[in-house]
Amino acid sequence: MKESLCRKLLSGITLCAVFLCSSCISQICNRPVPINNPDIGGGKILLYTTEGDFKGAANVGHLPDMVTFLPDGNGLVSANEGEPADDYSVDPKGSVSIITLNKKVDGLVQDVTTLTFEGVKVPDNVRIKPGSTPDVDLEPEYVAVNEDGSKAWVTLQENNALAIVDLKDKSIMAVKSLGAKDFDTIDIDSKDGAKVSKAPENVFGLYQPDTIVAYRTGGADYVVTANEGDDREYDAWEDYAKAASLKKKKGARFSPQLDRDILGQKGKKKLRILKDMGKDANGVYTQLYLAGTRSFSIWDADGNQVYDSGNDFETYLAANYAKVFNTRVDDVKKQKDIDELKEDNIPYEIIGKKAYFWEGVDARSQKKGCEPEALALTKIGSKTFAYIGLEKQGGLFIYDITNPKSPVFVDYFNDIKYDALPTRSGDLAPEGMVAFVQDKKHYLAVANELSGTIAVYQLANDGRAKKLDSLNVGSFDEGAAEILAYDSKGKQLFVTNGELKTIDIIDVAAPDKLVKSGKIDFSDHADSLQSVSVKNGLVAIAVERK
């Protein structure tokens, strides 16, 4: 149907209808509906059908890092991180965008409201970069929405805070500091093997969650967080450093207690700390703060913690995975470093210009430990289960969180081959998760960033996971599998592929025989992608401006 014919059809018709043709999308209504979708110079949320047809785009804030549909499918929320340039010549404001879709025309953006933190009261204990201001420095990372679509919770990872958003009034209700966790039972010694020792006094961790998911139980809303931890590493500002290096190279001063218990200990002096925190009025470090808490937490609707898993992860891994406790796949590029691997008889493999190898036991203890990052919740029968993926150590912890104040450990799934070369070790670095129900059975799909694989698990009534299949979708360590979403109608997964800059479509009609069935190529509209969400036949893709 040609555009001229569409215009003729429009004349004289007052009933509401929609005509779709190859050259136009025209809405015929007795009253035109105003569109509010201003270009504010930020990123975009691209909208496609599940068949890959482009429908439109919403203009949102800078660097939309995560997007999710509202439960009814009539809108979306995006967390726009607003990361700075390497030299901090530009540092866009972080923001949250609320997108309303037209209820009569699929994929038509009706309204976009982008909320910044200007004028929002921010507690003094929310972490802000020295010399910056909250409205500039706050960086939204991930979004969770409650069941009725009235409220959203947004993690501000680098800031160790949580933003609470009223989706009806389209306003930021509050910013809540998540506080610090005493590391008295967390292992920070890289020389004591698989042992969870008592850490010295005055050592704390910031929760700094990445993924957040909401659920309702007992008539109340709660959110669950995976407390990965994060630092900033830019040319103009790095906030994470080894304690010993700060003292030796920067002349940093530490209290006598920290000098003795941290700097004076071989297995602790290289502890990575957030260098902008912990100093007294004289510039002396009297407390040390680390990124991440190696745990998952549950918070009430107001951002108050009701549960934290403490040192559960570390205790379990030390007891059951002693030979690979706090390890990960690392890489080096310099020839002298590769030669050292040879001298130390450490198995490695060359991929591109890097040598990849498994670090030794305890290698992560002075850093961020196992790094809980991926997270998904599902309800099976009357129980709600949480699945927490460990980015560095690997594997999935499973908890029954039906009672948010008293979760119960269920299981830990890990089939990684730590004695094999990295590319033959299995599914590595879970980045994204989605739980879904298909043909009356419960499943969990996991996108593994390092290995570039998609794994699907069947979930038993008690929450335990059984792996059905794993599909390689790209090159090792190229970000070929990151974030994923499930389409119930098509029985397929939509996965962000950072390597090919596409959305890969994975057929899961037979969950034990995964097949890549197609892709969405958005190269006409953007160069890179951050997140994907699917609802009611629409695919939303969060992208940076081209």
Image (spheres, rainbow, N blue to C red):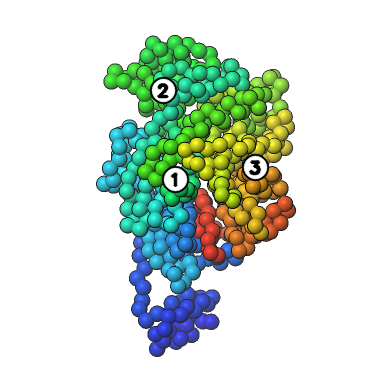
Disc 3 packing (10 Å; few <14; some 14–19; many ≥20):
some
Disc 2 packing (10 Å; few <14; some 14–19; many ≥20):
many
Q: Which mark is residue 464?
A: 3
Residue tagged 2? 288
Query: Under tag 2, what secondary structure?
Result: strand
| Residue found at x 45% / y 77% | 26
Using the image, determine if residue 324 lies above or below residue 253: below
* Residue nearest the observer in this picture, 210 or 132: 210
Query: Under tag 1, what secondary structure?
Result: strand
Amino acid type of the residue tagged 3 in the rendering: Arg
Amino acid type of the residue tagged 1 in the rendering: Tyr
Q: Residue lying furthest left in this view?
A: 119
| Residue found at x 54% / y 75% | 22
Q: Mark 2 or 1, which is nearer the eye? A: 1
Mark 2–mark 1 Cα distance, whole angstroms, equals 30 Å
Image position, residue 332 (x, y; %): 61, 30
